[in-house]
Image (tube, rainbow, N blue to C red):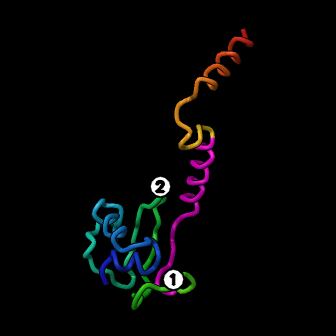
Amino acid sequence: MRIDKYLWSVRYYKTRSLATQACKKGQVKINEAVAKPSREVYPTDEIQLRKNQITYSLTVNDLPPNRVGAKLVDIYRTDTTPKEAFEAQELLKYSKDYYRKKGTGRPTKKDRRDIDSFYDEEE
């Protein structure tokens, strides 16, 4: 089975074309080697894929006949991703909360006046 089809069928990517794009960008490795989308996957292969700033590690147990349900995914792969990868994602999420919310853009004139009045009160 092709690697892009495998990643789609075990639900790491929503569409097969997204899995293909990830392979072309070099975000998917099989046995420590960068994989093209057409690379064949066999049981016992080690796959590393980078998605959402997390490097997932998984071992292929078996090849699914088609896209499988979420409850059946563990039959076809073993997730060996270290817990530290997810903890780093949590820390990154907390650090981003400090900044302005996405889409709020530049400060308005009212925001600017509030900032200026805040600094004037300190002096």
Residue identifier under label 1: 73
* Residue 59 among magenta residues: no
Instruction: Determine the residue positioned at 31% across, 64% down.
Output: 21
Counting from the top left corner in percent of width and height, residue 39 is at: 26, 76
Region rendered in magenta: 75-97
Q: Position of residue 111 (x, y in %)?
A: 63, 26
9 relative to 36 in the view: left or right:
right
Along the horizontal axis of the image, is 23 left or right of 11? left
What is the three-letter code of the residue carrying label 1?
Val
Residue 59, how many percent across, how many down?
44, 77
Q: Is residue 19 above or below residue 64?
A: above
- The residue where tag 2 is placed is 53
**Looking at this rendering, what residue extends furthest in the front direction?**
109
Q: Do residues under tags 2 and 1 come within 8 Å of each other at their CB atoms?
A: no
Q: Which one is nearer the viewer's eye here, 78 or 116?
A: 116
Quarter occupied by the N terminus: bottom left
- Mark pair 2, 1: CA separation: 22 Å
